[in-house]
Image (tube, rainbow, N blue to C red):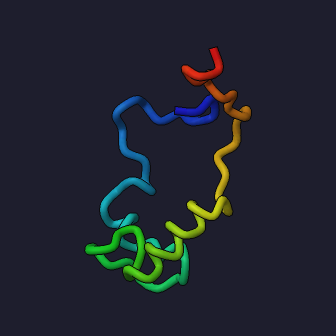
Amino acid sequence: MTANDNTPPGARRAQDTPQAKKDRACPICGKPRQPRYDPFCSRRCADVDLHRWLKGNYVIPGENAHPEPDDEDE
């Protein structure tokens, strides 16, 4: 819950209802979603999304991670 979100804990928001989820389009190509590949319409779009994550096109904001010391570095 965010500071501007007045939804009580445990309550469903409109975008979380099954009908609203069903009405949203594939985030890659905009076609209707298919239950088998939800939230995508096809395996191709799911693979495109996975490739974008692995390639580094999507980034979650935050501080850079500091590498943990290895056993060899001690």
Q: Nearer the viewer, residue 56 or 24?
A: 56
- When asked about the image quadrant of residue 74, the answer is top right
Q: Is residue 72 above or below residue 29?
A: above
Q: Residue at x 63, y 64 (%)?
A: 55
- When asked about the image quadrant of residue 56, the answer is bottom right
**Tag count:** 0
- When asked about the image quadrant of residue 22, the answer is bottom left
Q: Residue at x 27, y 73 (%)?
A: 35
Residue lying furthest top: 74
Q: Give percent across and percent down for residue 49.
A: 52, 70
Q: Give percent across and percent down for residue 42.
A: 38, 82
Q: Nearer the viewer, residue 2 or 39?
A: 39
Q: Residue at x 57, y 61 (%)?
A: 53
Q: Nearer the viewer, residue 61 or 71?
A: 71
Q: Give percent across and percent down for residue 3.
A: 62, 29
Residue lying furthest left: 36
Residue lying furthest front: 72
Q: Residue at x 55, y 69 (%)?
A: 51
Q: Is residue 55 above or below residue 13?
A: below
Q: Give percent across and percent down for residue 26.
A: 47, 76
